[in-house]
Image (cartoon, rainbow, N blue to C red):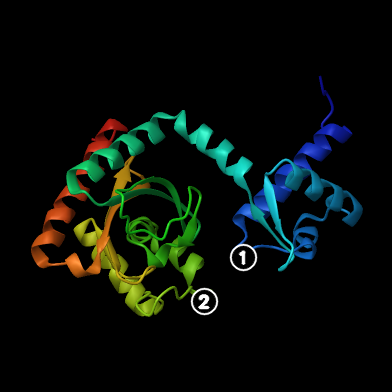
Amino acid sequence: MVKSGNSPIVRSAARALDVLEIVVQAEKAPTFTMIQKASGIPKSSLSYLLQELVQKRYLQFDTERKVYYPAVALFSLAAQCISTTSFSVELTRGIQDLQKETGETTHAVIRDGRFAVFIGKQAPAKAVSSVLNLGFKLGAHATGCGLVMLAAVPDETLHALLDDVDLEQYTPYTLTDKTRLYRELRHVRRYGYAFDNQGNILGGCCLAAPVYNREKEVVAAISVSFLASKATISYIRFLKRKVKAKAKEISMHLGYL
């Protein structure tokens, strides 16, 4: 048993966690130099550590771009952790039900800073989604779920997150103008849902609603995605009603009253 926080084993474990956090939280895939600068780990030690993490499939190394990405073992571990919580169980059950009720692709999303992280997906055979796998990240400004969660952030924190960054432009319709974005977030706060019109995938729209916990905090968002060609007023009303009702149901199961 390790008793000292200064032992080589504990120090190595701490360094491994530091590296994983740097790679996962980076806005773009980092190089060796970027990881070394952010972590302060000596180059020789970092080289060995990265080799171990790649070998164990926690990280993936792109030999052409010379950058590191999260890999399958890390996603698998995260998914197993998430799947054991009541929070995840309720989200999963909720988006499964929503998919059956609408016949459309549904997602569950949490926020990481100014990014939306997709932790759940239910899809029919012909899915409308840009999400490649669980843990997939997109700028929150470009997704319905992301807009819902940004709208729940206090203005001071919101400006700190967004004012000094260049927002990603995924499609010609991505909401990157800050004035328009803040106006849209005020709309989301007022009406309790967000509508994404091809913000991250051409030809795809989504409607999203917030999920609350017992402390009345927005802890996640769920959405239903559909083809832009189906976005009639009546269909949007139908989906909006469904996603808001399901988000409310999930929230109540999490203790929200």
Residue 255 located left or right of residue 62: left
**Relative to 97, is 154 above or below?**
below
* Residue behind mark 2: 166
Q: Element under label 1?
A: loop
Q: For mark 1, does the 10 Å Cα neighbourhood hold few (<14), some (14 to 19), or many (20 or more) residues?
A: few
Q: Element under label 2?
A: loop
**Relative to 61, is 245 above or below?**
above
Q: Which of marks 1 and 2 is nearer the N terminus?
A: 1
Q: Which mark is residue 17?
A: none
Amino acid under label 2?
Answer: Asp
Q: In which quarter of the image is residue 256?
A: top left
* Residue behind mark 1: 28
In the rendering, at what x and y percent does residue 130 appear? Answer: 41, 61
In the rendering, at what x and y percent does residue 151 appear? Answer: 34, 60
The alpha-carbon separation of the residues under discs 1 and 2 comes to: 13 Å
Q: Is residue 225 visible?
A: yes
Amino acid under label 1?
Answer: Lys
In the rendering, at what x and y percent does residue 247 appear? Answer: 25, 44
Residue 79 located left or right of residue 124: right
Q: For mark 2, does the 10 Å Cα neighbourhood hold few (<14), some (14 to 19), or many (20 or more) residues?
A: few
In what quadrant of the picture does the N terminus appear? Answer: top right
Residue that lies at the very extreme toward the right in this rendered image: 44
Q: In which quarter of the image is residue 235?
A: bottom left
Residue that lies at the very extreme toward the front in this rendered image: 125
* Count of labels in the image: 2
Depth order, front residue of 3/60: 60
| Residue pictured at 45% horizontal, 68% vertical | 159
